[in-house]
Structures are given as structure tokens and as C-alpha cells.
Image (tube, rainbow, N blue to C red):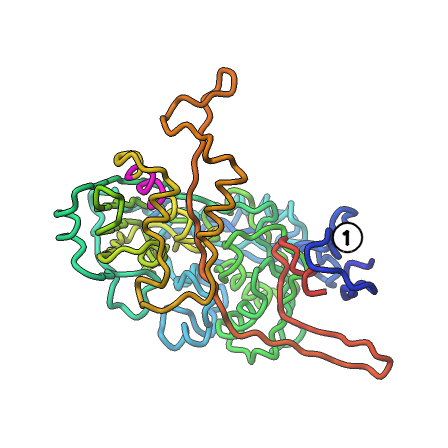
Amino acid sequence: MNSESAFETPPQIVAVGQPLSRVDGRAKVTGAAKYSAEYNHLPGMVHAVIKTSDVAKGRVTGIDTSTAQREPGVLAILTHQNLPKPAQTAETKEGKEAIGMAVQMTFMPLQSDQIFYAGQPVAIVVADTLEHAQQAAAKLRVTIAPEAPIASYHDAKAQLFNPGGKPDADAEGTKRRGKAAAAFAAAPAQVTATYTHATNHHNPMEPSATIAHWEAADRLTVYDATQGVSWQQRALSGYLGLPMDQVRVITKYLGGGFGCKGPIWPHSVLTALTAKAVGRPVKLVLTRPQMFTSVGHREDQEQTLRLGATKEGKLLALLHEKTSTTSQWDDYAETNSKFMGMLYACPAFEATTKLAKANVMTPTWMRAPGEAPGSFALESSMDDLAYQLGIDPVQIRLRNYADKDPSTGQPWSSKSLKECYQRGAELFGWSKRNPKNGLTRDGKYLVGWGMATATYPVNNSQGNARVRLYADGHAVVQVAATDLGTGTYTVIT
């Protein structure tokens, strides 16, 4: 199958649950699949390389382009002094509304001499080949006067604040149900534990890449490694002041995303501005080191969980406190406690989020954002409570089973968790488990034998499709969707 052709529905009807070969499988394993950095057919395409800051806070005080400019093949060296400005940025309310949900970091680099985080772009070098651009970037001299940065919420200079009540905050403030502190203090059984998580980076196999091609002064085509082509289209139209129908975003294949390819990041916008400046299609591929500082991360965080319960293991109080690091501009934090108030039937619940602004780029979604670290903390504490009371871990969860949403009192649209507990216990031989820790062995190895609950919301959003029905009986269905590697193309065909 030609990697650029439409995927065709199999002639036979295949029942759900049957093994299927992926419709894009052959293209991927034979190398025919084109990823975003592989559209090399554009006439006159040139290469861009980003030079980044090696300090976390400061000001650019000098840029010496003389040596770099003399390197072979160099076409342009763009800095905050000569790069074309975007029509608007997400730093204003109007700009954020125009750019839409794809924006995660409202700050746009290369607009001034200020440095706010290590890895921030300070220049873009454009040359006829990638190697020439890299060589010139290495010889470009950017002088930065460093200032003392704030590294994280651990920093003595960091000021913690509660983001609650701020309409533009992508973070929770404080949520309460009942009098959790009083209920915890009076509870016969108590568990208090703190869980610390280091910063996590996505680093999918395919690095982020953008090719920008201005087909006309007001018409842009972008080949981008993105999880959401529609979001990217709207964001670019907002940043560049173009009608949406004049911006086309193409992502045929994605080499993993894990959340970092959901939002739009500065390099995509900067590539489009660079292509405008040089008047030619421009390709920019982030290096592996740049993937650590250019596309967000799961923030470093600390969670303290307090559970209060009866001697029979029935929850009376659940208190969750989270502290994490965000950027200088955006109040972002994973919503760890969102599910905690609904997973178990607990009459008193309180969750508080505190942030510290530091010299880092804005964090972003990563693989079950909030649910992953939040579930780890809650389920670890539930196990601690079960161990303290001598109750089976499955049983303590059944005793706190929520037959309706404790947060709202609304019935569940569907819920089979109780059946999952029962079936899982049967399949894993739970009844044969030794409840005492450290006694199950496989030769010289100790073997853990445990269980935990995980939950994830059913998020719904608007979707659109175009269907064309032809006289010969075949139909063409078009959707603006990207297969993240999870088999979406196979599912929809």
C-alpha cells in the first residue's frame, strides 16, 4: 500500500475482538511511512537549528554572528532582534482565545532579551544543509548575563501559592466535602504518608519536528509531529493572524507522543516565522537533548495523603496536599486529586494544590496526567491502611466501594469495578496469597503480590467528519485525527 494513499476498509466484515493486522503496519515496517521530518520533496527546502540558552535566568547582552555568518551555506541567523514577530501571542487574553486550547506555554521565546529557563531558544540558524546549520550554530556566540534562578518548589526563594480562583489557571485550588480535618483527627485509624516524584520527560522515539511551507503570502502548510492537527491548525492561525482555512497541518504518522505532542510549542511557531523570513520551506527537528527542554514535562511534585478510618476500614476522611513547580507564566499542575474525591465512598474530603513559580518551561500532560501519580499515592496509602488494620487489600476497597459519585451524588453511567475485583482475584489466585510481607519467594527472589485500583475519566469533545458517497457505492470518510501509535487508523477503517 502506498503510504500516502487513503487507508481502505477491508472487504470482509471483521468481528470485534478478532486479531487484525494494522492497516499502516506494512508502511511502517518497510520504511515507506513518512513521518513529519521526512517530507523532503519541497523545492528549495532549507534547514534550521535552534541555539539555546545554557543558563536558567538572565539577559542576552551580546550576539556575535561574524564567525557563524561566514560558514558555508548559511542563509540567515535570526534572533530577538530580527525574527519576524507573530501576529499575537498567548500572553494576552485575546491572543489566548484566538490560539485556542493547544497552547500550553503562553510565553513565546525570541521576543526580547530575557532568559527565563535553560534550553530557551536564543537564536535560529538557517542553512542549505543540516550539517552547515549545526556547524554555524556551534560558532554563534551569544553572551548572557546570568541571574540567580529559582530551580523548583524546593528552592528557598520559591514562594508557594494556591492557584484557586484564578480563571486562567490550569490547576486546582482547594476542594472540600465535609469537615475532613476534624474527621481525620477523630478517626480511630490513621495513615499519613508523603510521596515525592521527580520531573518526568516524555521523550518519544520520534523527536518533535516541523516543516513550514508558505505556499503564498497568506497560505501555510505545516508538516508537524502533533497529536492534534485541528488544535495545531487553530493555534498557528491565531499566532500568525491567518484564517484557519489558509493553514493546513499534516501529520500522517506519529512516532509516539505521550502528551508532549498534544499542545503547540514555540518551535513550531518559530519554524513558520523562520520560513516567512527566508522565503523558503524550512525544516526544524529538535535534538534529543532539546526534547528535555522544549516540549514540557511532568512536573516535580510532592503529595501528602492522610486517611482516617474506622477499625473496620471504613473511610471517614481523605486529605490530599500537593506541591509542585510551574513556570513563570502559567499556573499548571496535574490534577492529581480530581479522581480521589470520587473513587471511594468517603464522607469528608479535602484537596489542596500549591504551586511555586520557577525558572522552568511550563509543564504539560504526560501519560495519565494526574491520575498516574495521584493513583500511586492513594493506592499506596490504602494498602498501608489495610496492613495496619489487618484487612485484605481487596476487602478494604470493597468496604469503601462507591455505588454513586460521592462528589455529586449522581449515579454512574456504568461501573463494573466490583466485578473486576472479583474476577481479578479469581484469575490471580488471590485467595492463596500470603498476607504477610516478605514471605513469598521465587528461588532467591522476593515476590510482591498486590493489587491496586486505577481510574481514568471518559472525556468527550466535539468531533466532525466529512463523508462523500459516490455513485459506484463507495464512500470516503475524512476526519482530522492522528494515530498516536495506538491503532486508530485500523479502528476507524
Viewed as shown, does residue 29 lie left or right of 273?
right
Q: Quadrant of the C terminus?
A: bottom right
Q: Which residues are magenta?
A: 378-385
* Vertical comparison of 262 with 256: above or below: below
* Vertical comparison of 164 with 244: above or below: above
Q: Position of residue 203 (x, y in %)?
A: 53, 45
Residue furthest to the top in view is: 444
Residue furthest to the right in view is: 472
90 or 2: nearer the viewer: 2
Viewed as shown, does residue 133 lie left or right of 476?
left
Q: Position of residue 392 (x, y in %)?
A: 36, 37
Q: Residue at x 83, y 58 (%)?
A: 1
Q: Residue at x 25, y 61 (%)?
A: 175
Does residue 64 show up? Answer: yes
436 or 166: nearer the viewer: 436
Q: Residues within 10 Å of mark 1 (few under 14, many from 20)?
A: some
Residue 379 forms part of the magenta stretch: yes
479 or 183: nearer the viewer: 183
Q: Position of residue 141 (x, y in %)?
A: 46, 46
Write down the residue under mark 1.
Answer: 27
Q: Position of residue 233 (x, y in %)?
A: 56, 71
Specify the amino acid type for callout 1. Ala
441 or 21: nearer the viewer: 441
Query: What is the chief secondary structure element of the magenta stretch?
Result: helix
Q: Residue at x 24, y 56 (%)?
A: 349
Q: Quadrant of residue 5?
A: bottom right
SS at circle 1: helix
Q: Quadrant of residue 172?
A: bottom left
